[in-house]
Image (tube, helix red, strand yellow):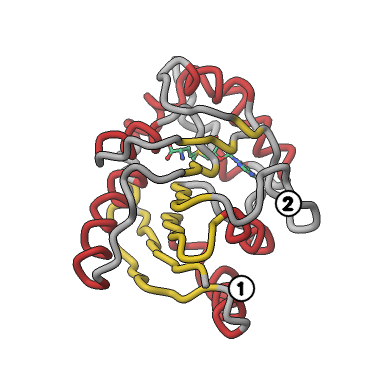
Amino acid sequence: MIDYNDTVYNAKTPAEELGYYERIAGHYEEKLRGINYLGSELCFKALKEFEEKTGIIVPRDGKCIDVGAGTGMSGEELRRAGFTGVVDALEPSDNMYSIAEQKGIYSNRYSDMLSPDKETSVAANWYDFVISCGVFNNRSATSGCFPEVVRFAKKGGILAVVMNNDYWEGYFDIVIKSLEEEKVIQVKYLESVDGYCDDKAARILFLYKL
Ligand SMILES: C[S@@+](CC[C@H](N)C(=O)[O-])C[C@H]1O[C@@H](n2cnc3c(N)ncnc32)[C@H](O)[C@@H]1O
């Protein structure tokens, strides 16, 4: 029996958020279907629009990392979108990753948690495409962690992020503006769309690493 009152929004700290995912991993996908979560589908729909609008084509055979890979739903969408190259996962929850692992999508797993004051073990300037669907918020993967994820992308690489729009204003908008001013990234696509899940909008962004 799924407890829909046990939600991630009750978590107040990174440890509580990790504990939530460890606890619910076995019914995570059913839970998300129950709230009509479409984070990863929105990401790859937007990828097509981003490519048409900018003329930048993300190489389908390049190296990718799925940040907050969870049970691999975003990785499955990546494969469905025609990505054939190496896909690595950053996922701190063992129980979530044990489900993802069975899908045979990921080559390497990094179990680090993103944190604003500690570098992860992921190599710098390595990936052609860095994606993150449904991970950034104000509890665990906060705006202060964003520069760390930018570090993973090679120069000329693309970062695609889909997140709950509620956490954008006053947090991520500020960090991304300052990364742009520091000439670390360029924002190439930025949209807010309905349909992230029941009653929530998504913020979708594509960034070019300078
Ligand atoms: C809502 S799930 C998204 C999973 C997948 N990307 C998807 O679209 O289905 C969020 C994931 O982020 C992970 N996560 C939470 N805090 C994190 C952090 N600080 N650093 C990295 N991953 C984190 C959780 O363990 C969880 O698997």
Amino acid carrying mark 2 in the image: Ser
**Callout 1: 10 Å neighbours few (<14), some, many (20+)?**
some
Amino acid carrying mark 1 in the image: Val
Task: Tell which circle, 1 or 2, labels the residue nearer the N-terminal end.
Answer: 2
Q: How many marks?
A: 2
**Callout 2: 10 Å neighbours few (<14), some, many (20+)?**
some
Quadrant of the rendering where the N terminus is positioned: top left
Q: Quadrant of ligand 1?
A: top right
Q: Farthest left residue?
A: 52
Q: Residue at x 54, y 57 (%)?
A: 153
Q: Which residue is mark 2?
A: 115
Distance, label 1 to label 2, CA atoms, is 14 Å
Within 8 Å of ligand 1, the CB of disc 1? no
Q: Residue at x 55, y 18 (%)?
A: 98
Q: Is residue 122 left or right of residue 2?
A: right
Position of residue 115 measured from the top left corner of the image (x, y, whole percent): 73, 51
Q: Which mark is residue 175?
A: 1
Q: Residue at x 42, y 57 (%)?
A: 160
Q: Is residue 9 left or right of residue 11?
A: left
Q: Is residue 66 above or below residue 23?
A: below
Q: Is residue 127 above or below residue 4?
A: below
Label 2 element class: loop
Position of residue 28 measured from the top left corner of the image (x, y, whole percent): 46, 26
Q: Nearer the viewer, residue 73 or 31?
A: 73
Position of residue 114 measured from the top left corner of the image (x, y, whole percent): 68, 48
Q: Nearer the viewer, residue 182 or 1?
A: 182
Q: Residue at x 68, y 30 (%)?
A: 19
Within 8 Å of ligand 1, the CB of disc 2? yes
